[in-house]
Image (cartoon, grey):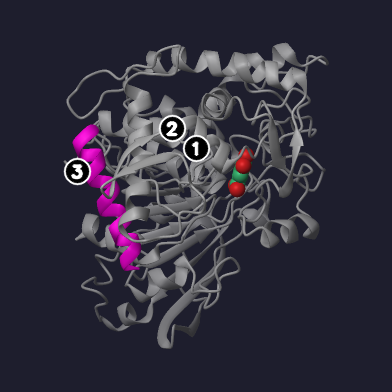
Amino acid sequence: MNNLQLIRVGVLSALLSCTCAGNTSAAPISGTAGTDTAPAAASSVPTLIFNGTNYTDEVLSLNGTPVAFRAYRNIPYVSNPKDIAHQRISIFIPAAYLTGGTVNGYTAATAPIFMPNGVGGYMPGEIEEPQEKSRMSGAPNAALTALSRGLVVVAPAIRGRTNTDAQGVYVGKAPALIVDYKAAVRYLRYNAARLPAGNTERIISNGTSAGGALSALLGATGNSSDYTAALAEIGAAGARDDIFAASCYCPITNLEHADMAYEWIFSGINEYHQGAPASTPNAENQTASEVSNRPANAPTETSSAAPMTTDQIAASARLKKDFPRYLNSLRLKDAAGNVMQLGSDGTGTFAEYIKGLYRTSAQYAVDNNASLDGADWFTVQNGCVTDVDLAAYARWATRLKATPAFDKFDLSSGENDEFGTETNRPRHFTKFSRKYDSTHGALAPAADIRMLNPLNYIGANGVRVAPHFRIRHGAKDRDTALPIPAVLALRLANAGTDVDFAVPWGYGHAGDYDLDELFAWIDRICK
Ligand code: DHB
């Protein structure tokens, strides 16, 4: 894992010299502190009281070393579930804490709580069980690694866009996923004194792709009143839902602006590699994802390219043109406090910032004799990467998605489905795509769109943003374009949040690939 450590240091040092995303100063927490609002609620929500009598004691092997833990499985975390199968959590406690022991310097009282979500493709998320061999990498998964390092693991199942209730009503469309994740946090806080171990003031979320977006959303929206009604409807516990830290791999976030950002990077590439829509959770899609080593439920990918239509190419140019206006409206600041700009010709300080992220990633590859994977988009002089050509980068990475990448004119994307109705009609989430949809499909309610975008909450009144974020976007990831996680990282840093943001070389759309580093980061922020 040494290589990955080098990536982090390399990217961070670049950030420190040219941007403020690597700001390491602890953030003053903004907004209301939020207190447990649970009344003497034991009688009003009896099903939410943690019952510590149902458990199994288990041992798994992490690369040959036994990891002993106690598992409390499948506990409902709301009292009025819409989909009981997906509103449950499992709690895993390192065995040492049950006898007063310590692990990695933590005790039962101080152990951070690692809270991975299994969401991908905005589909239902299943409980992340500790595993000796994970499906993707064949190595121990994040949950088992967390236990070995003394973290309590709390893994919720979460509703997704295909879930229905007994009447066939679709109950998992936006904003269900974030409402459920928050409800799981509230359940933990509500039961803080009843849990055998775990510090509910040190909850760390983790997720990849749509799950990375969800992790960012949980981190950015702590205690926001926007979600109160939806939380009440499912019978969530009365407690705070802010968290301590969010770990976000390749977050598919800021969906209303992701189409523009995508074209700002990929316009000019007129062929794409996305396969047939993966709209249903069937085994076929899973297999396709596994074959191409992509996260489960991510859109499928083909090795052969398909041409975009003339309409798509025209839409690409329009979306690309719209991105600078959006970017400039954010007034993002660099490390020196200067507002970053983007000109209509594609140049400007924000463009330099994006090039700097790729430059640092490429520098890592050069320094470590990593495979350059045919990369021809950066200039090296005397061992130093001196320049990046973004147009050449896009040719090298190739375009995964046809224009628009997310809000499809024909409503065929997973995101259109995510914003769909209770009767499963997909909807738009941008005015742009609604305008160019010849069938004039409906736009999702503004409140639902708002509740899925963390940028709406950073710095907002009454919101407690997690003081620590870790964001990763692989150098060859083109499920969303780099400006999307970059804007998130900058917004957070500008609001005083501690953000560790990097673009690791050698990765596309993936997560949990640097667990040693992830857990070292957790130790750093918690100890
Ligand atoms: C995921 C990937 C995507 O490209 C997307 O549009 C939505 C979700 C995912 O892997 O979760």
* Circle 1/circle 2 CB separation < 8 Å: yes
Q: Which residue is mark 1?
A: 393
Residue 389 rendering spot, x and y as whole percentages: 43, 32
- The residue tagged 2 is 389
> What amino acid type is highlighted by mark number 1?
Tyr
Q: Residue at x 77, y 42 (%)?
A: 277
Residue range in magenta is 1-18
Query: Which class describes the residues within 10 Å of circle 2: few (<14), some (14-19), or many (20+)?
Result: some
Tell me the SS state at disc 1: helix
| Residue 203 visible | no
Q: Quadrant of ligand 1?
A: top right
Residue 264: image location, x then y, percent = 52, 24
Kind of element beneath mark 3: loop
Q: Compute the Cα span from label 1 to label 2.
A: 6 Å
Q: Name the residue at 30% across, 20% down.
A: 340
Please name the amino acid that badge 2 sits on: Asp
Mark drawn on residue 253: none
Seen in the picture, residue 212 relative to 58 is either above or below; the reply is: above
